[in-house]
Amino acid sequence: MKTVLAALGLAALAAVGAVLYLLFRKPAAAAAPGIKVEITPARLERGKYLFEVLGHCDSCHSPRDFTKFAGPVISGLQGQGHVMPPELGLPGTVVAPNITPDVETGIGSWTDGEKIRAIREGISKDGRALFPMMPYQFYRSMSDEDAHALVAFMNTLPAKKNPLPRSKLNFPVNVLIKGAPQPVGSAPHPDRNNRLEYGKYLVTVGACAECHTQEGGGKLNKDLLFAGGREFRIGPYLVNSANITPDPETGLGSWSEERFIAKFNGFRSFDGGSAPAASQANFTIMPWIGMSRLHEDDLRAMYAYLRTVPAKQNAVTVHPEYAPSN
């Protein structure tokens, strides 16, 4: 009996020790690089493209008007952050922080190296792990030059004083996310002349898989990568992400390159506040208005790469009939 009790006691101590380790361990983090990003016209142009179009940073870090198609960013509020809608079903209160240069409520006190570390590695200025809704698992592939260009542009945003609470995650997510950040080394820029390589880079930095892959237990289902079917609810609307694999019946397999490009270009007329009203028939969280400005060469490279991913037969009803419960 004493042996059994001793074994149970040791097991209990081990369990307590494991819990304490998880609670108090720090995420893997390298020191922030000690750099000051030089601001040049070329970097500002590229950084704006990354922030508003390819990386669509502003679509998460800015309030959006979801009463209109594609939820355009509300004019004048770019980068000031907001609390994510609770109907997204996130594990707690998730806040997209203010990333303008305001010193008190934004990231004006951060060094450029700390900003790059947050973007690519998911580590805050104070060493906390960022909630991986921030797609640093994809941004870690961002080249050094693109990271510098993005920070250069962010440093020129108008400072917005917008105090926000910190994200407050439920247990055990608040503990498990500490394992998400991973230090990264130097990342070269891909060869633009290699269409497949560059297309893969664009699709990765664009975090396309984040929305176009079903999720479970906080992880993407890699067996259904790009196969769509992930559900998003905001306000009175629900949308399922589309299958963008080359499956000919349920994905993009029957789409020509020109049709793919035309799909993006078709939303350019909605820029500048002219988007139509949202409805269950057209609702989307896809930031089409910003992404309608993707360069044609980039779209061709993205299309070429998406033709090479494994085709997954997964029929998705993008806009199902939906009546939210009160």
Image (spheres, rainbow, N blue to C red):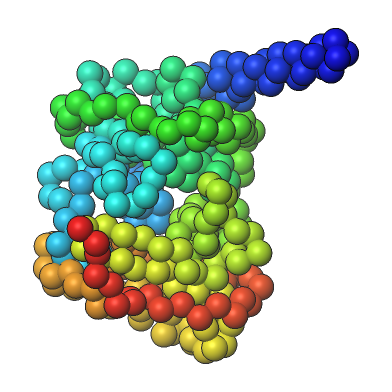
Q: Would residue 23 appear left or right of 168 to someone viewing this image?
A: right
Compared to 294, does 102 lie above or below?
above
Q: Residue at x 15, y 62 (%)?
A: 67
Give percent across and percent down for residue 236. 21, 63
Q: Tell me residue 194's x, y (percent).
A: 63, 65
In the image, 236 versus 265, the foreground residue is: 236
Toward which corner of the image does residue 289 lie, by quadrant? bottom left
Q: Tell how many labels.
A: 0
Which quarter of the rendered picture does the N terminus lie within?
A: top right
Name the image quarter holding the C terminus. Answer: bottom left
- Residue 270 appears at what percent x and percent y? 18, 69
- Residue 119 or residue 193, whichever sits in front: 119
Who's the residue at 16% across and 27% down the image?
161
Query: Residue 152: in sight, yes or no?
Result: no
Position of 250 relative to 268 (above/below): below
Q: Nearer the viewer, residue 307 or 66?
A: 66
Residue at the front extreme of this rendering? 1
Q: Horizontally, is 76 left or right of 212 in the view?
A: left
Residue 226 in sight in this render: yes
Q: Residue at x 13, y 70 (%)?
A: 277
Residue in the image at 34% along x and 56% along y = 53
Where is residue 285 shown, x and y percent of the image?
31, 61
